[in-house]
Amino acid sequence: MPFPSWGESQEGQSMLKEAVEQLDRAASLLGLDPNLADRLRYPKRALVVTVPVRMDDGRVVSFTGNRVHHNLTLGPGKGGIRYAPTVSLEETTALAMWMTWKCALMNIPFGGAKGGVCCDAPRMSRRELQALTRRYTSEIFMLIGPEKDIPAPDMYTNEQTMSWIMDTYSMQVGYSVPGVVTGKPVSVGGSLGRREATGVGLCNLVFASLLLIGLDPGKATAVVQGFGNVGSVAALELWKRKVRVIAVSDVDGGAYDPKGIDMEAMILHTEAGGKVSGFPGVKPVSNMELLEIPCDILVPAATAGQITKENASRIRCRILAEGANGPTTLEADEILQGKGVFIIPDILGNAGGVTASYFEWVQDTQKFFWDLPEIQRQLSRIMLRAFDEVLALSKEKGVSHRMAALMIGISRVAEAMRFRGLYP
């Protein structure tokens, strides 16, 4: 059966094909009812919108945006909004599907959603981005809300973007609704620890994995691809806990130093506008070269499709901790398994963000806010529980960690769908 297809985005099509193939393999292993499995291959709804923005030079540019609800069986939609040139309906649909499995794997009451606008955000002014955000929010207004769909930050969006969405939504309904988005500043109903949660949660699983394979963190080396919110936090957390971070990269290239890189200094360097490859005393490397540097821990935290059948045989790490969505193809996954790499799959590894978003939503709903130690305790508890469940099923069924994670998430959604039945 063909996979869903919209538009002409080759990268998005590849992501969607990968997501549907993952679903099909997991459904086969689960012995899922074919009728139910077929329903899961398609999103519940997808909205495409035009977002006209008056630019600083006076031109009105019409951008294309979207918001996709993959499955809302377990609760309101949850998923980020990204502003990037790669945004397409295919990409958004794949990401929404992965969000469905991720939320179910974490056992939190959300369904999978995703959205974005196709634009070059880093080249836009603050005024242009605010106009884009507010118009996009007004166009998807009918889909979002604290009981319907709760967006969050993603690629090239941040807490300021979420504040504009929250304000625009609140202006429409006539009162303040902090729970319409997560990833907001604390001053407008955000949660402590939310920004760092994805990177910190990933590192919690990395250290649990190091313990399992019997490797002392103080003797381990790490390579991190991507130095955005996830990668920079993960690199800093690893470095603080005595792992030697020998290479990191941003979109323009990477930096390599076998003696280790001071992550606090690197973050100060990038916050001052410097590029990772321009950090003093390092050897510049490309993003593809960086992935093949021998290390104990490899963290792909950039974009999808970075590790494929073409380069998987040259990947030399003991632990692959996926911070990005879909960084490893299924073909590459099999090659890495054959090499004995311990894989922390994306829907488990980067689930700290949606878990902390759940905490933020709960706090907004209850109007009762937690302190940071409580948030960190709950984050660690939920992620380590899911980690243990994945490892147990992997061992029981003789399947990969990725398949085990998918099987847990998909089976929970499928069970809820069976109980709820088919309307009408």
Image (cartoon, helix red, strand yellow):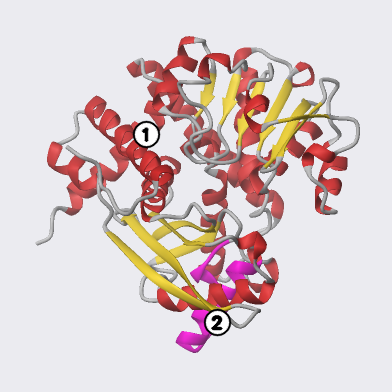
The kind of secondary structure element at disc 2 is loop
If the image is split into quadrants, where does the N terminus sit? top left
Instruction: Identify the residue at the far left of this view.
Output: 424
The kind of secondary structure element at disc 1 is helix
Q: Is tag 1's residue or tag 2's residue first in the polypeptide sequence?
A: 2
In the depicted view, which residue is nearer to us: 131 or 360? 131
Q: Position of residue 76 (x, y in %)?
A: 38, 61
In the depicted view, which residue is nearer to us: 141 or 75? 141
Residue 110 is at least partly visible in this image: no
Looking at the image, which residue is at 70% across and 53% down? 372
Looking at the image, which residue is at 41% across and 70% down? 144
Q: Is residue 178 magenta?
A: yes
Residue type at mark 1 is: Leu
Residue 36 is at least partly visible in this image: yes
Estimate the spatial distance between the alpha carbons at disc 1 and disc 2, rounded to whole Å.
37 Å
Circle number at residue 332: none
- On the picture, is 187 further left or further right than 39? right
| Residue that badge 2 annotates | 176
| Residue that badge 1 annotates | 406
Q: Position of residue 69 (x, y in %)?
A: 34, 58
Task: Please tell me how crowded label 2 is: few (under 14), some (14-19), or many (20+) other residues with Cα within 10 Å.
Answer: some
Q: Tell me where residue 413 sits by quadrant.
A: top left
- Residue range highlighted in magenta: 160-182
